Image (cartoon, rainbow, N blue to C red):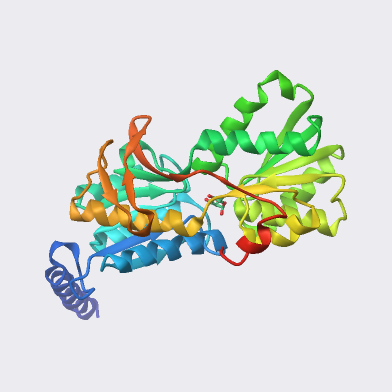
């Protein structure tokens, strides 16, 4: 019996080695079985986030405009481990580029370095990986402006007085953590001396958790005057909780929201105004940057320029010890324009 099993395993092993060889042979230069097309992967933080879907949609449009094939991925949970597994799979599939919206700034480094060593072009967008793990980062807007403007908005909404809380995404999210750092710097200005940040809560960009974290904030801080949610999932969840509890006039809400999800709360006054950028464009710019990296038009160095389709010419600029490409400025959504924008994204 043992002999039969052993020889069966030997045959199986030989067959799988053959299969592996033929797979490698059919994927010269990494362009694989996409009919000679280059393959560009994007990995978002997690599934179930309409903002992420819009970003991936923009990436796909750009990749198709440039003649490539887009691979859209997102794990169920917003963890680094799940993204590492996806990166490993994409390395073995020999894709040409990987664009990642990181769930952790440092944890993806070994996997992304392995990808770059294998000749795969690596970039991050929206939520960055550290400078060693990428060739370039695609930034939606200046993090300082994004952070400061949210404190300025909350201060205006509550007359510069009272307790405020932040409802964020995950505790490891590079983008939200950077924005929160800038919020704290803005709060150091003496003009905010009567405002107090009592808590940063994490809803993990999961709808139910964001709802329960909002409820917990309201319970723990009965005098809370404002919630700042720098995440589209968080702000929509908080909007629903404040609406359901009839707290519109007691607790103000601002942050970063998707107009299509936030229109009802902007119109009702639960969130007097909020900010965002065009997530489709963040993905689109990333698609063109990935294409330029693969074609060798850019290598990720500051000063290099390329044409990003309908967005026109873009330049790579320094970002700490790495580089980035900036999309634009955060945009303010209020009752005067939300009706128009809710149709767009
Ligand atoms: C959520 C995600 C995303 C962030 C937006 C503002 O959708 O956390 O990364 O950029 O909010």
Instruction: In this rendered view, identify the residue nearer to me: 102 or 18.
Output: 102
Establish if 340 lies above or below 229: below
Instruction: In this rendered view, identify the residue nearer to me: 222 or 137.
Output: 137
Left or right position of 118 against 48: left
Residue 90 visible? The answer is yes
* x, y percent for residue 245: 86, 56
* x, y percent for residue 132: 31, 37
Left or right position of 143 against 275: left
Residue sitting at x 75%, y 35%: 156
Residue sitting at x 84%, y 51%: 248
* x, y percent for residue 38: 23, 65
Establish if 165 lies above or below 99: above
Quarter of the view holding residue 284 = bottom left
As drawn, which residue projects farthest toward the front? 336
Residue 111 visible? The answer is no
Assign the C terminus to one quadrant of the image.
bottom right
* x, y percent for residue 55: 47, 59
């Amino acid at each position: 019996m043992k002999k039969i099993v052993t020889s069966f395993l030997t045959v199986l092993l030989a067959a799988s080695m053959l299969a592996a060889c033929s797979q490698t042979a059919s994927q010269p230069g990494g362009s694989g079985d996409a009919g000679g097309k280059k393959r560009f992967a994007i990995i978002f933080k997690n599934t179930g986030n309409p903002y992420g879907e819009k970003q991936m949609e923009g990436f796909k449009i750009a990749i198709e405009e440039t003649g490539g094939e887009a691979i859209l991925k997102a794990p169920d949970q917003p963890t680094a481990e799940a993204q590492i597994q996806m990166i490993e799979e994409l390395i073995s599939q020999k894709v040409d580029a990987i664009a990642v919206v990181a769930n952790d700034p440092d944890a993806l480094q070994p996997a992304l370095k392995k990808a770059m060593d294998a000749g795969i072009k690596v970039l991050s967008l929206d939520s960055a990986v550290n400078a060693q793990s990428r060739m370039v980062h695609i930034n939606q807007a200046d993090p300082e402006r994004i952070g400061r403007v949210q404190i300025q908005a909350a201060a205006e909404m509550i007359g510069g007085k009272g307790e405020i809380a932040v409802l964020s995404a995950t505790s490891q999210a590079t983008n939200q953590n950077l924005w929160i750092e800038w919020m704290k710097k803005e709060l150091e200005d003496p003009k905010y001396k009567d405002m107090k940040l009592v808590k940063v809560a994490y809803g993990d960009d999961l709808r139910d958790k964001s709802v329960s974290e909002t409820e917990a904030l309201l319970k723990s801080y009965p005098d809370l005057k404002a919630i700042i949610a720098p995440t589209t999932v968080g702000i929509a969840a908080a909007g629903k909780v404040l609406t359901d509890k009839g707290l519109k006039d007691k607790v103000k809400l601002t942050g970063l929201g998707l107009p299509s999800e936030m229109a009802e709360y902007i119109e009702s006054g639960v969130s007097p105004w909020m900010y965002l950028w065009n997530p489709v464009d963040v993905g689109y710019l990333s698609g063109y940057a990935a294409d330029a990296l693969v074609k060798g038009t850019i290598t990720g160095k500051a000063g290099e320029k390329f044409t990003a389709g309908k967005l026109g010419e873009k330049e790579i600029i320094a970002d700490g010890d790495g580089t980035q490409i900036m999309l634009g400025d955060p945009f303010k959504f209020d009752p005067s324009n939300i009706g128009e924008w809710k149709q767009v994204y």
